[in-house]
Amino acid sequence: MNLYQFIQLYKDITSQASGVL
């Protein structure tokens, strides 16, 4: 996994977390 993929994954997780909140 490269840095770009990691950032995209991180943004996806944080967007899901804020959706729960």
Image (spheres, rainbow, N blue to C red):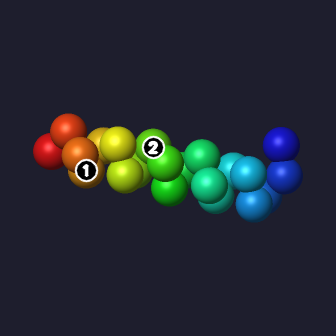
Q: Tell me residue 13's x, y (percent).
A: 45, 43
Residue under numbered circle 1: 18
> Relative to residue 7, is residue 1 drawn left or right?
right
Residue at the right extreme? 2
Who's the residue at 37% across and 52% down the image? 15
Amino acid type, label 1: Ser
Neighbours of disc 1 within 10 Å: few (<14), some (14-19), many (20+): few
CA separation in Å, label 2 and label 1: 9 Å
Residue at the top extreme? 20
Amino acid type, label 2: Ile
Neighbours of disc 2 within 10 Å: few (<14), some (14-19), many (20+): few
The secondary element bearing badge 2 is classed as: helix
> Relative to residue 16, is residue 9 drawn left or right?
right
**Does 18 appear above or below 4?**
above
Who's the residue at 25% across and 50% down the image? 18
Residue under numbered circle 2: 13
> Relative to residue 17, is residue 2 drawn left or right?
right
Q: Quadrant of the N terminus?
A: top right
The secondary element bearing badge 1 is classed as: helix
Please report whichever mark, 2 or 1, sits nearer to the chain's N-terminal start.
Answer: 2
**Does 11 appear above or below 13?**
below
